[in-house]
Image (tube, helix red, strand yellow):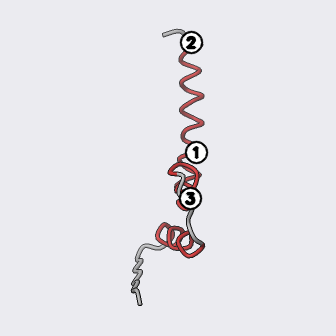
Amino acid sequence: MSSNQSSYFQKRERNLMKWVGYWRRNPQLFVRDYLGINLKLYQKILFYMMNKSDFFMYIAARG
């Protein structure tokens, strides 16, 4: 493997790790950017709080 090719892969890996860190800090943005799902405000808050809190419980009901 040439040094040019290895530097390309190293640069690509660094960029990927930056995105991974960004998405780990902002899981609601991962859902929007990577999965392409538009969330409601309460869903964004739930994703954020699930990531920040060690203990999380969400009780939902219909009706």
Secondary structure at numbered mark 3? helix
Disc 2 marks a residue whose amino acid type is Ser
Instruction: Work out whether residue 43 or residue 18 is closer to the camera in this orientation and state it.
Output: 43
Which residue ends up furthest to the top in the rendered image?
A: 2
**Residue ID for mark 2:** 3
Q: Residue at x 51, y 69 (%)?
A: 52
**Residue ID for mark 3:** 25
Q: CA distance from mark 1 to mark 3?
A: 10 Å
Relative to 29, is 11 above or below? Answer: above
Between label 3 and label 2, give the one nearer the viewer.
3
Residue 37 lies, in percent from the top left, at 53, 57
Disc 3 marks a residue whose amino acid type is Arg
Residue 10 lies, in percent from the top left, at 55, 26
Disc 1 marks a residue whose amino acid type is Trp
Q: CA distance from mark 1 to mark 2?
A: 24 Å
Residue 49 lies, in percent from the top left, at 51, 73
Which residue ends up furthest to the front in the rendered image?
A: 63
